[in-house]
Image (cartoon, grey):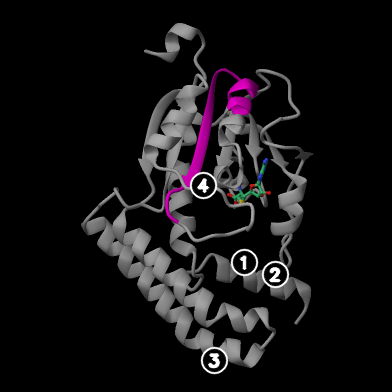
Amino acid sequence: MGATWRKRLNEIWESSWLCSEQLEKRLIVRSLAEARPYVSGDLLDVGCGHKPYAALFATQVRRHIGLDYPPTVDQHMTVGYRAPQVDIYGDGTALPLRDAAVDTVLCTQVLEHCAEPGAVMAEIARVLKPGGHLVLTAPQEWGLHQEPHDYYRFTRYGLQHLAEAHGLRIEYVTARGGFWAMMGQRWSAYLYDNYARPFRRRGQRLLFLLAAAFVLPASALTQLLSLGLDRLQPLPMNTLGHILVATKPETARDAVS
Ligand SMILES: C[S@@+](CC[C@H](N)C(=O)[O-])C[C@H]1O[C@@H](n2cnc3c(N)ncnc32)[C@H](O)[C@@H]1O
């Protein structure tokens, strides 16, 4: 199969419910779409990876600047046909930008990979213009990934504390789904990671296809069912994670109002 076809098939698979992490992806996209009113001007995407949300904000930003950290982006984000979309290489704990340089900072599923998340938050606050906004997502519940660079999980209070400790004013912190979505997503990932992915990793194509014929529909069904249950009974105490939207105050007095 040609590279273009393989890329196309991967794209179709990644946007379908057969993909074992579809629920997490869709809940992140939905939360980011709701945060659109806070996104404008020059946007710095800290830990951008493949810039998966560039299209979501394309019509409302002047520039979408992707920043990523060489040790981790090279090790974990250069997979298959996908290449990272990095404009600037740097470390979230020492951003190579002047003070008050950008209108928006986007930071999705990055903070758990930073050994010093407080230092990253301090840098985000520094490079934001007064009146600028931070849109950040982070997991509360997810399996180990990108090891050994996987240090933390965050509750809503942890995220709020980090942002406020660095002078940002919280607009809102919202759970991305509740107990049922979390259970369905974890179960779906468990099925794929344990009963299909190992064959793919070992290059055992026939065994992978056989396993996938059972695992993928089960995974899709689990995710759709849990999404339905989540809508019927929202229980945000146990969630996959949160979105936090915060503002850099114009003046110190605004910080507490
Ligand atoms: C789970 S990926 C998320 C990528 C992308 N933001 C997304 O939502 O798909 C974590 C990203 O954080 C980056 N990262 C890890 N440590 C970092 C640091 N100290 N500074 C900036 N980026 C970092 C990794 O290279 C990786 O691209």
**Mark 1: few/some/many CA within 10 Å (<14, 14-19, 20+):** few
Rounded to the nearest whole Å, what is the CA distance between mark 2 and mark 1?
A: 6 Å
**Mark 2: few/some/many CA within 10 Å (<14, 14-19, 20+):** some
Q: Quadrant of residue 102?
A: top right
Q: Percent from the top left, x then y, of residue 213?
A: 50, 87
Left or right of 20, for residue 128: right
Residue type at tag 1: Glu
Discs 2/4, front: 4
Q: Does residue 37 show up magenta in the picture? A: no
The residue that mark 2 highlights is 7
Rounded to the nearest whole Å, what is the CA distance between mark 3 and mark 4?
A: 36 Å
Whether label 2 touches label 1, CB < 8 Å:
yes
Is 234 in front, or is 150?
A: 150
Residue type at tag 3: Leu
Would residue 60 be visible to someone looking at this image?
A: no
Residue range of the region highlighted in magenta in the rendering: 122-141
Mark number, residue 11 = 1
97 versus 21 height, above or below = above
Which residue does the image show at 73% across and 20% down from the upper left? 98
The residue that mark 3 highlights is 210
Q: Residue furthest left?
A: 233
Rounded to the nearest whole Å, what is the CA distance between mark 2 and mark 3?
A: 22 Å
Is 16 in front, or is 206?
A: 206
Residue type at tag 2: Lys
Q: Quadrant of residue 3?
A: bottom right
Q: Quadrant of residue 208?
A: bottom right
Main secondary structure found in the magenta portion:
strand
